[in-house]
Amino acid sequence: MSHLNDSTMRKRILFSTLGVFAVATAFAQGQGLAGINEATSMMTSYFDPATKLCYAIGAVLGLVGGIKTYSKFSSGDPDTSKTAASWFFACIFLIVAATILRSFFL
């Protein structure tokens, strides 16, 4: 009889342990989902200011590049077209990158 009680006791302990792990796992998943949702809302709240910051940086770099290109053009530098092209495509890239990142993540 003692052997039967040991086997029954082991089964009870095993099922109790599995039940506790199942409940703990379900609770952890609920907390994890809430954490993921909170992180997502925090990240999406930063995209509007970050996009505006990229546009502002693009505007400043555009002005600086325009002045640099004008000064090279005025001095007769033969490298003016390369400078103008790099300035233009850098501004376009910054604007397109900010717009695409915003549309991709939001």
Image (spheres, helix red, strand yellow):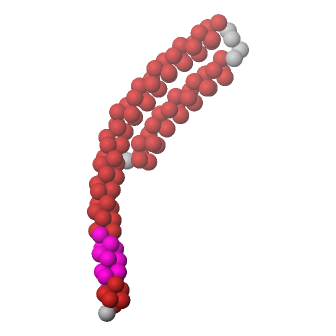
Toward the bottom, the furthest residue is 1
Question: What segment is highlighted magenta in the picture?
Answer: 8-20
Toward the front, the furthest residue is 2
77 relative to 2, above or below: above
Q: Position of residue 95 (x, y in %)?
A: 47, 34
Q: Main secondary structure of the magenta part?
A: helix
- Looking at the image, which residue is at 50% across and 22% down? 62
Left or right? Give the position of 23 relative to 98: left
Toward the top, the furthest residue is 75
Q: Position of residue 69 (x, y in %)?
A: 59, 15
User: Magenta stretch containing residue 31, yes or no?
Assistant: no
Q: Quadrant of residue 6?
A: bottom left
- Looking at the image, which residue is at 45% across and 42% down? 101
The quadrant of the picture occupied by the N terminus is bottom left
Residue 22 seen: no
40 relative to 6, above or below: above
Q: Position of residue 97 (x, y in %)?
A: 49, 38
In depth, the one of 100 and 49 nearer the eye is 49
Residue 95 seen: yes
Q: Quadrant of residue 46?
A: top left
In depth, the one of 2 and 89 nearer the eye is 2
User: Magenta stretch containing residue 19, yes or no?
Assistant: yes
- Looking at the image, which residue is at 62% across and 26% down? 85
48 relative to 65, above or below: below
